[in-house]
Image (cartoon, grey):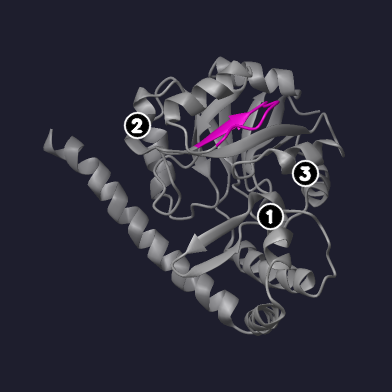
Amino acid sequence: MREDGVADVHTHTMYSGFSKYSYLSFPDSVTTPKKSVQIAQKIGLDLLCITDHNTIKGAVEASKYNRDLVVIGEEIRSKSGEIIGLFLQEEIKPGLSAEETIEQIHEQDGIAFAPHPFSVYCPCVGNNLHALRLDGIEVFNSLHRDGFSNALALESCNGHAKLGGSDAHSSSMIGNGYSTFSGNSQEDFHRAIKKGQTSYGGKPAPLKDIVNYSIRVAYESSKMLLNFNNIQCPMYDRISELKKSRKMMYLMGSFAYAFSPLPVVCTLIGNKILSLRGKKNMIEQNKPRLLL
């Protein structure tokens, strides 16, 4: 028996909608809630926090498979960056101020924390976190492989609970980052965060996980284009609205991408660019301290 509980505080399912990079729009995740639960049980997590973008639908669906395991959460896009709410009963609308978002989380007796607060590619609260009534800070996000943004988050964590999460966008990423706490129940975890008595651990997401994610996106998109996967979610809703000619174009593109070297090439290039951007951001953040 472990003395400490283990929770992944930041994961996504196919209910997270779409991400956009430059002119490209693609599903944020293609993992079903059921698959997320199965993987979490397999690797021995005590708690799995499902935090889809601006919705709790994926978390509610997942909780049907294991109510004790799944913590209902939401990654909410506020005007000042993303904020995660845990232990929610109702969905919180995006587009509010950070203060209003946190207030609505606390009105539900929920936990509010800043995910990837110094990210160079995700909407983040940045230095505003010092003025917000946050319960915790994600000081380790395994998807931020550059290391610099996590280091900045850890340096800025004064008096907040230190949290770790995978930011999993595919099932293979679940558990790459995690938080530890005394006990193993949702009540124990809620209490530990409020008291600032949590720790964190994990590893940067392996590049193979990111390659696998991009291939799965292309593969699952193809299944939906061919009507092999009739699951009601933002991804299916958008695909169902496409004209037949546009569907065929996307289908050919998905196959061409999935069965080519492109996933590996794109992952390597993207990893290098984000690492350089992360380093530049850390230097800029540390400039005021050096001048003092």
Residue at 46% across, 70% down: 23
Q: Residue 234 carries which label?
A: 1
Q: Residues within 10 Å of mark 2 (few under 14, many from 20)?
A: few
Q: Can residue 117 be seen in this view?
A: yes
Residue at 44% across, 43% down: 150
Question: Which quarter of the rendering shows the N terminus?
Answer: top right
Circle 1: element type: helix
- Which stretch is magenta? 83-93
Circle 2: element type: helix
Residue at 80% across, 44% down: 37
The correct choice, above or below, for 95 with respect to 211 in the image is above
Residue 47, position as x, y percentages in the image: 73, 33
Nearest the eye: 190 or 177? 190
Q: Residues within 10 Å of mark 3 (few under 14, many from 20)?
A: many
Indicate whether residue 91 is drawn in magenta: yes
- Tell me which label, 3 or 2, sits earlier in the chain: 3
- Tell me which label, 1 or 2, sits earlier in the chain: 2
Q: Which mark is residue 128?
A: 2
Residue at 59% across, 17% down: 107
Indicate whether residue 203 is drawn in magenta: no
Q: CA separation, marks 3 and 2?
A: 33 Å
Residue that carries the numbered disc 3 in the rendered image: 40
Q: Which of marks 1 and 2 is in front?
A: 1
Disc 2 marks which amino acid? Asn
